[in-house]
Image: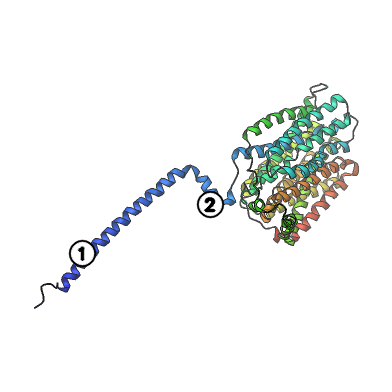
Amino acid sequence: MASSGILPATVIDYTDRIHASKESTYISKLSEIGGIVATSRDVFVRRVDSSRDEDIDTFQNPELKLPSLRSLFVIIGGNAVFQLSFFIVVSSASVYAEHLGGSATFSGLTIGIPTIFSGFALIFITKYDGGQYAQPLTLAYACMVLGNILYALAYRANFLYLILIGRIVSGFGFISFMYTKRYCSDPRIVGIRRRTTLAGLLVIGQAFGFSAGPFLGGLLYKVGFGNQVFNGVTSPGWIMAVIWLMFWGLSSVMFQDVPRQQPAQSIELSDINSPAEQIEPPQTIRSALREITPAQWGVIVCMCYYSMTCFFILGSWEANIPVFTAEALNYSPYNAGNFIALGGLVSFPFLLLNVWYARRIQDRVILAVGTSLGMLGLIIMLCILQTSKVTFGSLFICWFLIALGFNLASTCTLSLLSKQLPDTWNRKVSMAIQYSNYTGRVTGAILGGAGVKMGMTNYIAVQLSVVGLGGVMYLTLWKQLKAKTG
């Protein structure tokens, strides 16, 4: 007989199953409670951070980051006003210069010369800007106010070179062209997939400037005002001076600068008298240069050349149209200004579409399409000149294709470089692209002013050769020009 102190195996198994089932029930209850707590915590966190969804998205995908909308408004809106200031004198500059004893070539120099002095100013200003934007923009606003006033006073003073002096002072204000481009590709505040989009917005401001500027200048010339101080050729200067005073005040309230760059800790800890520190900057420069491959150098040269080409063609046509149409179609400055503005106005919707589709299309494709359209306009113009059939319609088709094509091509030069090169090169490539722009603007304006004198066929042939050389570079570097979209 079994001992009473020993339970049967069936009883023991039954007891173990009861304890195990109770234990598993407790564990499942505890896990359920833990899940409820975790879910509640997640809901709570989401509710607290719901107002910061944009910051979270930006943190998760830095390629899509953007600066504040207020600062972007100042940069992009200011770029449009700078473009307006540059082009508002185009339609009446030749008449203004001739009234004071100058020639059409001198008027072309008046249009293009600000970029020369802007290039000189950038050498010194970029050395001390500390990677920031507020102080250079403030200097630009002040120069625009003073330069436009001097330009307007030339008529009353009856002094031809005061026009030039006024435009030179304004040229120091046009340093903003480089700073706006650099701001829209600055890796500290703009993600890599936002740079072509912002560049497209800058080009829309550019299109606004070369459309509204000549139209407003021509309209003011037609009204005339019959005054020794405020008349058809001086009123653009006075009006732009007032506009710049107002925009200066607006910018000082709205614009938020990027944080000032902090020196690296290794510099703070290093010995001042250490010989290693004295040789560090050359090593840094050499190591930075070694980062760039031969293929990347080819892309840099190609983009700088295309940047020069776009503004060379646009600048030459803007300076040439008032002179050429006065001879071929008997246009007044008012008619010439309307003609220039109409080309920009018709191309405006296509540039807006480019801002949208830039998120999906590669920069090299945009560059190819824009350059092809512009070259088509030049070829048609050459055919028109050879057949001596210059009419409003035929000339306008050429101008529309050129205005659309080369504005479109100019959107992707800096953005493509900023995507392919290290972030530390942003300031260098911004300067390189801007100097290329300046070279194109000044040489194009001089060529446009002298276009009738040198012969219009020769004038177009020079432009075709410039574009053709760029096409050879582009086809050679097609594979190397690939970059991220957006």
Residue 269 sits above or below residue 251 on the image? below
Which is nearer the eye, 38 or 304? 38
Under mark 1, the amino acid is: Ile
Residue 425 sits above or below residue 180 on the image? below
Q: Which mark is residue 60?
A: 2
At 66% across and 34% down in the image, what residue appears? 251
| Residue that label 1 marks | 18
Horizontally, residue 258 falls left or right of residue 340, namely: left
CA distance separating discs 2 and 1: 50 Å
| Residue 127 horizontal/vertical position (percent) | 75, 45
| Residue 204 horizontal/vertical position (percent) | 68, 41
| Residue 420 horizontal/vertical position (percent) | 68, 56
Q: In the picture, residue 131 is in which quadrant?
A: top right
How packed mark 1 is, by other alpha carbons closer than 10 Å (few <14, some 14-19, many 20 or more), is: few
Q: Secondary structure at mark 2?
A: helix
Which is nearer the eye, 403 or 296? 296
Horizontally, residue 71 falls left or right of residue 28, namely: right
